[in-house]
Image (spheres, rainbow, N blue to C red):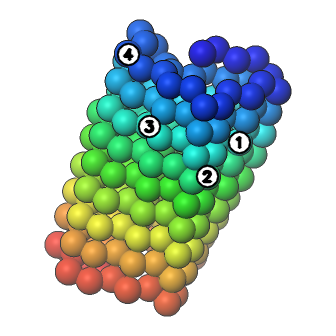
Amino acid sequence: IEAGGNATIENCTLSSNGLSGIFALSACRIAHNTCAANLGSGVWVTGASNRIDGNHCTGNARGIDVDVAGNFIIRNGIIRNWGGSGIDASLTSNALIESVAVQNNGGIGLKVDQCGVVTRCVARDNVLVGLLMGYGSTLRDCAARNNGDDGIQGGTGCVVISCASRDNGDDGVQVGEGGSVSDCSVTANSDDG
């Protein structure tokens, strides 16, 4: 499905397509869809102010790709078994991602660039970093377990609050200069806590 601005895509099943399951521009609502086995991304958005809510994505080349200058929301989804990263919002700012599970992905579980807010998310069994945050981002009430690299990795000025990180292949939690970590449980990681 290819959608222009202000479109709604909901309750659809998209599978085995040559590119992405869903490609959308600005201010779209993408809700309660199932995206499986597409050769590109399950969901790919390229404009601001999109809301991605309650989608189930599995077995695509990439999970959710967000090529946006800023302002979007991803909520209530399961992103698993992608060949690459589960959610790649590394070209964005001011993202809000909440109540999403990213698991068994071939790259990073979830990555967000500057000033993102990620809450109540879980990253498990991803090949690389579980939760990767750009500078000035906040991570709250999240868990990272059994990821191949760091469980949680934050850039300069990141804030990590009330999170758990366990059994990861490198550090449990790593933050850059000026970052802070509080009220976290960090256990049994291969390198530093």
Which residue is at 38% across, 86% downward? Answer: 185
Q: What is the secondary structure assignment of the residue under circle 3?
A: strand
Q: Quadrant of residue 119?
A: bottom right
- Per the model, the C-alpha gap separating discs 3 and 4 is 12 Å
Which numbered tag is attached to residue 75?
Answer: 2
Q: Amino acid at mark 1?
A: Arg
Residue 101 makes an appearance in the image: yes
Q: Residue furthest right?
A: 6
Q: What is the secondary structure assignment of the residue under circle 1?
A: strand
Which numbered tag is attached to residue 16?
Answer: 4
Which numbered tag is attached to residue 51?
Answer: 1
Residue bearing mark 3? 57
Marks 1 and 2: CB-CB under 8 Å?
yes
Q: Amino acid at mark 2?
A: Arg
- Per the model, the C-alpha gap separating discs 1 and 2 is 8 Å
Q: Residue furthest front?
A: 11
> Pointer 3: residues within 10 angstroms few (<14), some, or many (20+)?
many
Viewer-nearest of labels 4 and 1?
4
Q: Where is the N terminus found, in terms of image quarters?
A: top right
